[in-house]
Image: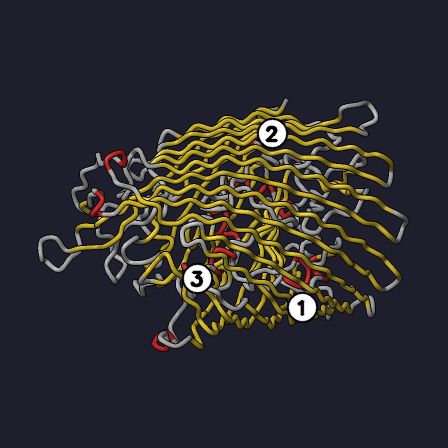
């Protein structure tokens, strides 16, 4: 609970790395990693969720009101209030973002999995695991192409996770949470100084959970250990080192969906699972990150950073291979299966650096980065002829054992990808009201994939520039319109370039026109943002509906839409967060053999989304009550089947007594059965969670 005074932490120190937060958190959030911290009482309910400054879009600390691009920042208070354990819990609060599959999202109509951690490449959950939030202080969202600053990236936008940092201010908490479906978690967060002067600081984070979700044969275990060390070497120099270890075990996974008819009606119980109890998905990952920042003078600062991760993901699961009507009544009631035994080993290294020069009306940013990614992939498969049995949709009989299958090698590959780039950007304050931003970046890539089955090597390389030009203007204290033109450039995933996947494919290219207005009303109590955009993306890859081992490319896809975000005080103790998005994404050009797809809606691209979260503080009893809603209109899966619209409601209660806090969250309040998205007909739609109840107790010490 934060019913007492709300604080803003002003940061003094080195310029943060691209994408790092310079957040104004509430009492419970983790401060930025600096030795000097100044507390300023703000005392308004809106400070629970609202963040007014970020360096995500520009690479420099910039007011969002002066940023010529749509940005949303989800701070730690919002994450905690919504009891968000993984990023999928937060999509309601991000306009234009909806769930696609696993960690993939639909972002302004396009599927993507492009994310950053503290502005750097290197996702430890790479593969089919979903990013967890135990060590995350902010989720930052940049809408539209980010290539001119971050390098190759999808045109819908980019999600950046800001990790919790070591702080010179001591904070310690222990949280235990229990819930239905046998959920139990423990989270320890500790940070503070290591010496009296506060020059050295530490962070210790530990998180562990276990649950038995409603999907048959499934269980989940997560463990995250997060360590950090900060050294304020001088007033001008700061060093931060971090290490994170992640273990995740998912029983009865990799989870596919539940088959439906063409109208989106489930053909099986919503908890149906194609997997046996012995199936699993296991992830183990280690992440190392180092960051050094220095202020050379009052006008020149810089930062160097490195991030290295390695992970291993093993999957053994039953994949639906064909839907069948076993009794001739015209309704599919049986699924043939195949068994897949896969292992992925990933490692990635990012090196990045930048300089920021503040020269009068100009703020110049220049930098470079390099990323090397390696994957070793091994895939064994067994099919019906190898002894894999099917499964009824209405009366499934589990008990098949992979030990009896004759498995054969389907794929074995070794892939190496390199991405590198140089960029320069100028923020020009033409007048006190008029700002112009211009940036250009040159990116290059080299990919190599060795197919150890066919003994064939495929390689690809190239380079291309990306541009961005934007402007903001203060019409009045209430209105700040902005406009943006930018381009995007994304080399195809190296694994998709293999001839066995249908490759090689030309790189994806995109361009965006965006216009919007940020408005501030009732003495800045209400912040209302409106954005409209038009994105053209070329060479978009999708899984071939007729062969999930191959990809197909669409020549051109057009996405148009409008987004509205409202954040503000309805009353002294009542804060509201609303997000609405309208999107229309359609195929405009298709390659030979796919001309019938022209004009069709893109898969899992809902026309409308609406998300709401409201919190009312009750100071007399040191408590707060919250309500949430998530609405997503109808969609189509990749096979053209309908995914029905849905509305889901949540509720929460928080209360605080001395150093204790108790929080109750109820998700999917009315236990609605629905699908969040679809894939292809034989694998079905991905069902949303049923009602979840969580009761958490936190002790500050």
**395 and 497: which one is in front?**
497
Q: Which disc number belongs to residue 465?
A: 1
Measured from the top left, where is residue 399 in percent x and y? 21, 34
Kindly identify which residue carries mark 2.
205
Q: Could you tell me which quadrant the C terminus lies in?
A: top right
Measured from the top left, where is residue 582 in percent x and y? 47, 66
Quarter-of-image position of residue 523: bottom right
In this rendering, position of residue 314 left or right of residue 398: right
Q: Which disc number belongs to residue 553?
A: none
In this rendering, position of residue 497 left or right of residue 644: right
SS at mark 3 in the image: helix
User: Which residue is pictured at 31% across the width and 33% down the height?
Assistant: 278
SS at mark 1 in the image: strand
Measured from the top left, where is residue 488 in percent x and y? 60, 66
Quarter-of-image position of residue 428: bottom right
In this rendering, position of residue 74 left or right of residue 382: right
Q: CA distance from mark 3 to mark 2?
A: 44 Å
In this rendering, position of residue 367 left or right of residue 321: right
Name the front one of labels 3 and 2. Answer: 3
**304 and 586: which one is in front?**
304
Name the front one of labels 1 and 3. Answer: 3
For mark 3, does the 10 Å Cα neighbourhood hold few (<14), some (14 to 19), or many (20 or more) residues?
Answer: some
Tell me which label, 1 or 3, sits earlier in the chain: 1
Q: Are marks 3 and 2 in contact (CB under 8 Å)?
A: no
Residue 568 visible here: no
Kindly identify which residue carries mark 3.
499
Tell me which label, 3 or 2, sits earlier in the chain: 2
């Amino acid at each position: 609970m934060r019913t007492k005074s709300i604080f803003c932490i002003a940061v003094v120190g080195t310029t943060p790395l691209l994408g790092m937060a310079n957040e104004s958190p509430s009492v419970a959030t983790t401060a930025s990693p600096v030795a000097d911290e100044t507390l300023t009482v703000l005392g308004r309910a809106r400070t629970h969720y609202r963040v007014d400054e970020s360096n995500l879009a520009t690479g420099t600390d910039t007011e969002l009101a002066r940023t010529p691009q749509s940005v949303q920042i989800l701070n730690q208070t919002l994450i905690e209030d919504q009891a968000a354990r993984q990023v999928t819990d937060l999509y309601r609060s991000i306009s234009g973002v909806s769930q696609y599959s696993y960690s993939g999202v639909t972002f302004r109509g396009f599927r993507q999995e492009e994310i950053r951690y503290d502005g750097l490449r290197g996702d430890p959950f790479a593969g089919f695991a979903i990013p967890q939030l135990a060590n995350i202080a902010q989720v930052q969202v940049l809408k539209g192409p980010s290539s001119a600053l971050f390098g190759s990236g999808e045109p819908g936008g980019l999600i950046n996770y800001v990790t919790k940092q070591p702080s010179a201010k001591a904070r310690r908490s222990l949280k235990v949470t229990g819930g239905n479906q046998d959920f139990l978690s423990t989270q320890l967060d500790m940070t503070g100084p290591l010496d009296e002067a506060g020059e050295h600081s530490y962070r210790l984070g530990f998180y562990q959970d276990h649950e038995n979700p409603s999907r048959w044969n499934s269980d989940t275990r997560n463990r995250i250990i997060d360590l950090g060390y900060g050294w304020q070497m001088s007033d001008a120099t700061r060093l931060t080192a971090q290490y994170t270890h992640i273990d995740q075990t998912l029983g009865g996974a990799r989870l596919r969906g539940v088959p439906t008819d063409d109208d989106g009606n489930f053909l099986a119980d919503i908890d149906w699972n194609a997997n046996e109890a012995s199936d699993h998905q296991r992830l183990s990952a280690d992440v190392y990150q180092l960051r050094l920042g220095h202020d050379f003078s009052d006008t020149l600062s810089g930062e160097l950073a490195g991030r290295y991760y390695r992970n291993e993901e093993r999957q053994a699961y039953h994949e639906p291979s064909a839907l069948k009507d076993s009794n001739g009544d015209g309704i599919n009631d049986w699924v043939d299966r195949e068994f897949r035994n896969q292992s992925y080993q990933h490692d990635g290294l990012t090196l990045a650096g930048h300089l920021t020069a503040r020269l009068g009306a100009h703020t110049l940013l220049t930098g470079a980065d390099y990323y090397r990614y390696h994957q070793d992939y091994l895939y064994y498969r067994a099919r019906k002829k190898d002894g894999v049995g099917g499964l009824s949709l209405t009366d499934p009989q589990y008990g098949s054992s992979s030990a009896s299958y004759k498995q054969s090698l389907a794929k074995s590959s070794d892939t190496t990808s390199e991405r590198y780039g140089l960029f320069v950007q100028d923020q020009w304050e033409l007048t006190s009201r008029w700002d112009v931003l211009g940036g250009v970046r040159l990116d290059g890539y080299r990919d190599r994939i060795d197919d150890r089955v066919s003994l064939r090597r495929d390689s690809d390389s190239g380079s291309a520039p990306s541009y961005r030009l934007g402007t903001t203007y203060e019409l009045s204290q209430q209105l700040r319109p902005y406009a943006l033109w930018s381009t995007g450039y994304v080399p195809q995933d190296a694994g998709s370039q293999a001839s066995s996947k249908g490759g090689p494919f030309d790189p994806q290219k995109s361009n965006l026109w965006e216009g919007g207005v940020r408005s501030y009303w009732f003495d800045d109590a209400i912040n209302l943002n409106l954005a409209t955009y038009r994105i053209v993306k070329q060479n978009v890859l999708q899984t071939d509906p007729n062969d999930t081992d191959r990809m197909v490319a669409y020549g051109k896809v057009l996405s148009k839409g409008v987004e509205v975000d409202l954040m503000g005080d309805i009353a002294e103790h009542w804060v509201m967060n609303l997000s609405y998005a309208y999107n229309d994404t359609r195929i405009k050009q298709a390659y030979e053999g796919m001309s019938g797809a022209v004009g069709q809606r893109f898969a899992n691209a809902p026309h409308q989304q609406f998300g709401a979260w409201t919190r009312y503080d009750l100071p007399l009893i040191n408590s707060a009550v919250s309500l949430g809603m998530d609405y997503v209109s109808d969609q189509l899966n990749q096979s053209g089947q309908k995914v029905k619209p849905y509305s889901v409601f949540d509720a929460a209660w928080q209360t605080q007594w001395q150093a204790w806090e108790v929080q109750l969250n109820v998700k999917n309040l009315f236990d609605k059965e629905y699908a969040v998205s679809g894939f292809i007909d034989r694998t079905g739609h991905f069902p949303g969670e049923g009602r979840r109840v969580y009761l958490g107790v936190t002790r500050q010490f």
